């Protein structure tokens, strides 16, 4: 089978984009990753070490048998459900997490594709299914294969139909396939994403300061969110789409998401905040089993809901926040509930903070209560 046969097979298996690159090292990637690590731009991603950068920047260091990478893209762009006018305080979830866990879906699709490539090749192949192995490296493969081009927001921007709303995956193969050329496209003078980012997490073109990014803070980051960033998070409870929403090449993205990646209900895109703050372990498991949003864990989602409620300006949230401050099992959730009560203010919020101050066992929560009372 040649590269063209394999790419058209990939499209017939439901992938929206398919391109090929070699398995050779990505030129210049390792020093770039090390510079980002040294600058603290990958802070919080403790697994992203120089050793990891060394392996990740050369696919054959990980898979010595690999000759080519089949680089694949699946659009997750789905039309947004309409927001109900029901007076419920709601947060926002990034588009990519509106549906099922994409890792399972993409791996299943890739396994089916590999089986068919093997039938066509007439022999068993050495092949892998890489998805989210390291996002930066997924992007390097996609850029070199010409599946898309790097935007200044560090996303890969592909076609007019998909924009940057893409899951990327790679199938390394022990086949020598004709590689595709990179695209000759760039953002030009546009800098809309850099201007729109509420936390200034894109300090320079093509640089993401991960510890400031709402996507990192609401998903990967465990524990307390820096106080100065909380007001900038707004109503995001899982991820953030702002730098993609303002991106001109995304304006014409089509509703291409496979059914499993589409929202089933309004709460998948705009979850009610108070149930997120108060959910039990069992409720969390029942509600988010097999869903991408599960990655933030129950305590993370409760923490994020407290921040969004604090940013809502709506004192209807005070009783739920007061209950969370008094009884949530995770200290960092109580910390953010205290902060949110301080933001919302009023007599009931102050009384809840005063009550908890008398009994709170955790020193960090105590500090937050004192801050909230002085606010
Ligand atoms: S995802 Fe949000 S916070 Fe992160 S860089 Fe983009 S706009 Fe900024
Ligand atoms: S908003 Fe503009 S600068 Fe940012 S990624 Fe999109 S095209 Fe590039």
Image (spheres, rainbow, N blue to C red):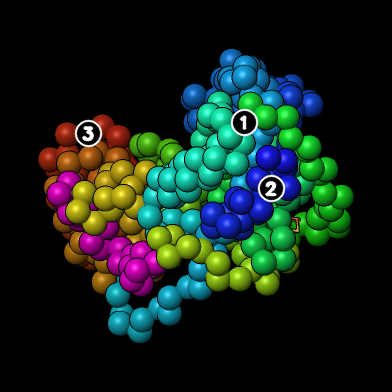
Q: Which residue lies at the image location 55% right of the left edge and 67% below the top edge?
A: 256
Mark 1 or mark 3: which is in front?
Answer: 1
Question: Residue 107: x percent and y percent?
Answer: 46, 42
Question: Residue 321: x percent and y percent?
Answer: 24, 58
Q: Secondary structure at mark 3?
A: loop
Q: Which residue lies at the image location 38% right of the left edge and 36% below the top edge?
A: 222
Q: Which residue is mark 2?
A: 5
What's drawn in magenta, residue-wise?
263-284
Disc 1 to disc 3, C-alpha distance: 53 Å
| N-terminal label among 3 and 2 | 2
Disc 2 to disc 1, C-alpha distance: 14 Å
Q: Which image quadrant for residue 126?
A: top right
Q: Which residue lies at the image location 61% right of the left edge and 71% below the top edge?
A: 254
Residue 281 is inside the magenta segment:
yes
Q: Nearer the viewer, residue 274 or 23?
A: 23
Q: Which mark is residue 173?
A: 1
Q: Which residue is mark 3?
A: 362
């Amino acid at each position: 089978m040649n590269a063209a046969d394999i790419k058209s097979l990939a499209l017939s298996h439901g992938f929206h984009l398919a391109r090929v690159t070699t398995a050779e090292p990505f030129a210049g990637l390792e020093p770039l990753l090390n510079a980002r690590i040294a600058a603290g731009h990958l802070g919080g991603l403790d697994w992203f070490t120089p050793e990891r950068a060394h392996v990740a920047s050369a696919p054959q260091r990980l898979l010595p048998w690999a000759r080519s990478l089949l680089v694949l893209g699946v659009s997750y762009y789905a039309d947004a459900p309409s927001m109900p006018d029901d007076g419920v305080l709601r947060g926002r979830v990034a588009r990519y997490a509106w549906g099922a866990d994409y890792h399972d879906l993409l791996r299943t699709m890739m396994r089916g594709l590999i089986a068919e490539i093997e039938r066509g090749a007439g022999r068993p192949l050495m092949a892998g299914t890489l998805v989210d192995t390291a996002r930066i490296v997924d992007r390097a493969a996609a850029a070199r294969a010409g599946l898309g081009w790097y935007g200044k927001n560090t996303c890969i921007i592909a076609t007019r139909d998909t924009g940057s709303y893409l899951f990327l995956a790679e199938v390394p193969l022990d086949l020598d396939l004709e590689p595709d050329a990179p695209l000759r496209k760039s953002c030009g003078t546009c800098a809309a994403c850099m201007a729109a980012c509420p936390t200034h997490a894109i300090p320079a073109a093509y640089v993401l300061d991960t510890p400031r990014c709402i996507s990192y803070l609401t998903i990967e980051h465990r524990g307390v969110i820096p106080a100065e960033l909380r007001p900038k998070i707004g109503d995001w409870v899982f991820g953030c789409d702002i730098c993609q929403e303002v991106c001109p090449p995304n304006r014409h993205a089509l509703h291409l998401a496979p059914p499993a990646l589409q929202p089933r209900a309004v709460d998948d895109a705009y979850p009610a905040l108070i149930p997120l703050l108060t959910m039990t372990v069992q409720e969390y498991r029942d509600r988010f089993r097999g869903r991408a949003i599960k990655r933030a864990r129950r305590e993370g989602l409760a923490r994020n809901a407290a921040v969004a409620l604090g940013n809502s300006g709506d004192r209807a949230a005070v009783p739920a926040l007061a209950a969370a401050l008094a009884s949530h099992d995770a200290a960092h959730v109580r910390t953010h509930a205290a902060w949110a009560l301080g933001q919302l203010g009023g007599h009931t919020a102050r009384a809840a903070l005063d009550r908890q101050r008398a009994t709170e066992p955790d020193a960090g929560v105590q500090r937050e209560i004192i801050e909230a009372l002085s606010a």
